[in-house]
Image (cartoon, rainbow, N blue to C red):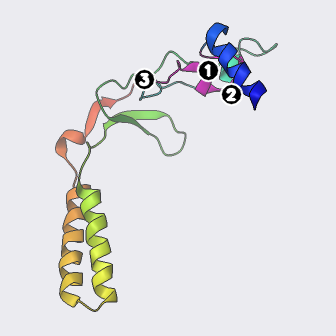
Amino acid sequence: MLLLLVNVASSLRRGRIAGSNPWDAGTLEWSVPSPPPPYNFAVIPRVASGHPLWEDQLKGSEQLSSIGEGLVLDHGRETIGTSPLDGDPDLILKMPEDSYAPLILTVASAAGFTGLLVHWWWLAAVSGLVAVLAMILWLWPERRLGQLAGAVDG
């Protein structure tokens, strides 16, 4: 333990600062800066191999992955909708914002099951109604969450 503490202390005082990929790893998680931003990637990367960061270093392989070029999702909570057969990006979807509906659904479900266990039928019925209303509130489609950018050019 003493050797470990000495190593940590000496590294903190005169050690070199490690870069974003100190081991020259070939996987995608090492392409983001450290500490990583909350969104991970500003541009959704196109990955064509198991080691996209090594493609230019491997002999006989061509650069197929594209880490810095692709669709930019910079308008809040967005995700990509893909085609079901080949997974090509079709459109950009706006995702819903935070909601209290899942919390209300959880509390209502717990109260409903508790009511069933202790034979308080009125509590089970009221909780069931609140749970159904919370599910409707949570899953109701919002018009503003439709296709944000329309079809993606491919």
Is residue 30 magenta-colored? Answer: yes
- The CA distance from mark 3 to mark 1 is 14 Å
Residue at image location 27% in from the left, 84% down from the top: 115
- Whether residue 122 is situated above or below residue 152 in the rendered picture: below
Q: Position of residue 68 (x, y in %)?
A: 51, 15
For mark 3, give the secondary structure: loop
**Outermost front residue:** 2
Is residue 56 magenta-colored? Answer: no
Q: Residues within 10 Å of mark 1 (few under 14, many from 20)?
A: some
Residue at image location 49% in from the left, 16% down from the top: 69
Residue at image location 66% in from the left, 22% down from the top: 52
Instruction: Please indicate whether residue 80 sits to the left or right of residue 133 in the image.
Output: right
Instruction: Please indicate whether residue 33 sits to the left or right of residue 9 in the image.
Output: left
Q: Residue tagged by mark 3?
A: 71
Instruction: Please indicate whether residue 128 sits to the left or right of residue 5 in the image.
Output: left
- The CA distance from mark 3 to mark 2 is 19 Å
Q: Which numbered disc, 3 or 2, marks the residue that appears first in the sequence?
A: 2
The answer to whether the residue labelled 1 contacts the one labelled 2, judged by CB atoms less than 8 Å apart, is yes
Q: Residue tagged by mark 1?
A: 65
Q: Nearer the viewer, residue 6 or 58?
A: 6
Three-letter amino acid code of the residue under disc 3 = Leu
Residue 127: quarter of image? bottom left
Magenta segment: 20-36
Instruction: Tell me, for residue 144, which label it has, or none.
Output: none
Q: Position of residue 136 (x, y in %)?
A: 21, 62
